[in-house]
Amino acid sequence: PSRGEVILEAREVTRRFGGLVANDRMSLQVRAGEILALIGPNGAGKSTMFNQLSGVDTPSAGDVLFRGRSIAGLAARDIARLGMSRTFQHVRLLPGMSVVENVALGAHRRGSCGVLPAAWRLDRDEEARLLAEAARQLERVGLAEQMHEEAGSLALGQQRILEIARALAADPCVLLLDEPAAGLRLLEKQALGQLLRKLRAEGMAILLVEHDMDFVMGLVDRVVVMEFGQKIAEGLPDEVQRDPAVLAAYLGD
Ligand code: ADP
Ligand code: MG
C-alpha cells in the first residue's frame, strides 16, 4: 500500500445488543503510515468497534471496508489473511513456549499484504521458514536476544511487544491494538511508543484503542473519541484534548 491509502474504514457501523446500542453509526478511517487512536471512557464501545473491524463480530448495520472492499460478515481468519492483525486487551501468549515459537505461530497464519518478498512463500522447508520469519520479526521489534526464553518469563512490557511481533509475522498492512499500554511502566510505555513510531515510518496503518490519554497524545496522528457508542470528537490530539465534549466525557469517567 502507498502512504496515505485508506486501509480500513468503518461506515456508519451500528451494533446493538438487545436494547443497548454499543456502536451507533460509527465511521472512521485508518490510513497507511498513520496511527489512529480510538479513545473514550469505559463502556463507550471501543472494544465492540474493534470487534466489528476485525470480524470477531458482525455489525447490525453499516459496513466495514478493507482496502475498499466490504469485509462485514467475513470470518475473522479470512480477514486476517487479507492483511489485518490484532492483539487483544489481555495478553494471549503460550507462556510455556519460547518467544520465537510464539511468533512462529503468527507466521503460520500469514496473510497476503504483499510486503514480504515472494521467496518467503515459496520456501519448501516450512518449519525452518516459519522460525526464520519469526526471528526476523523479533529483530524488527528489538526482542531478538530473548528469542529462546520462555514467553511467560518476560516482563509485561516485553510480552506486549512479543504479541505485536506475532501479529507482524502474519504480514499485515493494518495492525489493531487493544489497550497496548495498559498496566505498563513508564519505560515500557516509552519502548512501546518507539516501536509503534518505527512501524508507522515503515508505512503500517495502526489503530489502537487506549484508555491512557498521556500515552496516546504524544504518539498518534489522529484521535477518534467515543462516548455511549457514538463518536463525539475527531481530530489532532491537541484539538481533541481541548474539546469541551471530550473533557466532559472524561470528567464523568
Ligand atoms: P469499551 O471497550 O469502550 O470499554 P465495550 O465495547 O466493551 O466498551 O462495551 C460497550 C457496551 O456494550 C457496554 O455497555 C457493554 O456492556 C456492552 N457490550 C459489549 N459486548 C457485549 C455483548 N457481547 N453482549 C451484551 N453487551 C455487550
Ligand atoms: Mg474495551
Image (cartoon, rainbow, N blue to C red):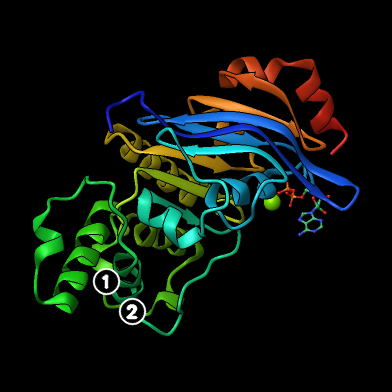
Q: Residue at x 36, y 73 (%)?
A: 102
Q: Is residue 219 visible?
A: no
Q: Residue at x 21, y 71 (%)?
A: 130
Task: Verify CB contact (< 8 Å) between mark 2 and mark 1.
Answer: yes
Label count reads 2
Which quarter of the image is occupied by the C terminus?
top right
Secondary structure at numbered mark 2: loop
Pick the residue in front: 20 or 160: 20
State the image quarter where residue 237 is shown. Answer: top right
Q: Which residue is mark 2?
A: 98
Indicate whether 178 appears above or below 152: above
Secondary structure at numbered mark 1: loop
- Specify few, some or many for label 1: CA neighbours under 10 Å numbering under 14, 14-19, or 20 or more: some
Residue 121, given in percent of the width and then of the height, sits at 15, 62
The three-letter amino acid code for the residue at tag 2 is Ser
The three-letter amino acid code for the residue at tag 1 is Met
Q: Which residue is mark 1?
A: 147
State the image quarter where residue 109 is shown. Answer: bottom left
